[in-house]
Amino acid sequence: MAKKSNNLKWILALSAILAAIIFYQTSHPPEKAPMQPNPGYNLEKTGAGVVLDFTETANKIHASVDGGLNSINVTPTAVKEAKQEVPRTGVEGIIRWHTRSMLIVLPETRSPEAVEQVLTPLAAKAGGKVIATEPDTYNGAPAVRIDVGIKDSLNSEPLTLVTDRIYIAKEKGALPPKPKTESKAGYMAIVIDDFGYIREPIAEYANMGRPITFAVLPYRPYSNEAASKALSAGHLVMLHLPLEPLSVAEEVEPTVITVNMSDEEIQQRVEKAIASIPGLKGVNNHQGSKATADRRVMKTVLSVIKEHNLFFIDSRTNGKTVAADVSRQLGLRTGENELFLDNSSDVELIKKQLRKAVAMAQRNGSVTVIGHARPNSVIAVREMIPEIEAAGIRLVYADQLVR
């Protein structure tokens, strides 16, 4: 009887403890985990990976820039806007944001530093910062460039997204001086082919400080890096589409479009190549001395390019090419290579070709030329820029010369 009584006491004690625990938990709900700070992006999961969309933060930074400029009675002009996408580093997915460029003209009594001082705290409140303030040019005239945007780290990797690129010119130098004679005015678009093979020329061309059109090969080791750095620096990106050459020995790309392919095979390869390069606006051909002379092949290739609203530049690797002709018939904005700059790797010979291009631009009003992503070509282009501009030639992106 005593044993039963003890067992009952234990049961009652345990029941009381259990009831107390239930009462405490129901009357004191667990504290919520503290909210994590806003990472600055919206996350979207897709079949191709995770999209980190910084557009909302970019728009807030845009508004802060507009407010800052308005507070000092400065109205921007030549505003250009674009949506940007680059692949993520090390994982599948993309980073998306919105970017703008603009020109502001200051009186002699105001300095770029004053603009930077106004924008710095406003950008910080919007989740951004002034990333850089550097000497630059705008339409050939001296300027100062202020880059505002997002500078952070993502998965321990540095992340820099320029949302607002502001060119500041003084009233007296806002526009380049008119050349003494109209015959010496002109425009030059420098297209650099073969990005993707090696890394070294990517940053050199991206940081050139002048318009350079990046023609990026698909599926090469550094293709995405080239396109991403070009876009981040504000450059124009094209797909450098491999087409069949006359010589089989020259065919080194893994996914060349050949004249023996069916229309369906060609369409699939062009679609896949376009999808592989982020942010592209146009296409030019890599090699293709055989394929560009085949009207059926080019009509099939260019029809896909037209569906994506891209422009096309015929690299003219064969004098019998029909690519530009077919492109114009289909209604694409079209351009043609007028001079290869670096058939030789000698720096002085490349400079000689650039001087020839200057003369062509002076004579005809504009010229589109093609060089390559090679170390000596970088040196020649960089060292020739002062001479090109001194001749009254304005460097522009390739899409500004297509018709």
Image: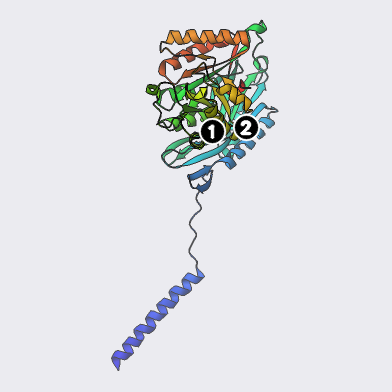
Q: In this view, does 271 lie to the left or right of 362?
A: left
Quick one: label 1 or label 2, which is nearer the N terminus? 2
Q: At which x and y percent is residue 76? A: 67, 27
Residue 76's place in the image compared with 352, above or below, is below
Q: At which x and y percent is residue 281? A: 56, 30
Q: What element carries label 1?
A: loop
Please name whichever residue, 325 or 374, is drawn nearer the observer in this view of the structure.
Answer: 325
Question: Which residue type carries mark 2?
Answer: Glu
Q: In this view, does 211 lie to the left or right of 22?
A: right
Please name whichever residue, 323 or 28, is drawn nearer the observer in this view of the structure.
Answer: 323
Tell which residue pokes out farthest to the bottom in this image: 1
Q: At which x and y percent is residue 163? A: 57, 33
The N terminus sits in image quarter: bottom left
Say which mark, if any, is on residue 64.
none
Determine the image quadrant of residue 158.
top left
Q: What residue do we see at 50% from left, 68% from top?
A: 28
Q: What residue do we see at 39% from left, 84% from top?
A: 12
Q: Is the C-beta separation of discs 1 and 2 under 8 Å?
A: no
Say which mark, if any, is on residue 81.
2
Please name whichever residue, 257 or 203, is drawn nearer the observer in this view of the structure.
Answer: 257
Q: At which x and y percent is residue 256? A: 44, 30
Q: What element carries label 2?
A: strand
Q: Callout 2 environment at 10 Å: few (<14), some (14 to 19), or many (20+)?
A: few
Q: Callout 1 environment at 10 Å: few (<14), some (14 to 19), or many (20+)?
A: many
Residue 86 in sight:
yes
Q: Mark 1 points at which residue?
A: 279
Tell which residue pokes out farthest to the top in this image: 180
Spatial CA span between label 1 and label 2:
13 Å
Question: Which residue type carries mark 1?
Answer: Gly
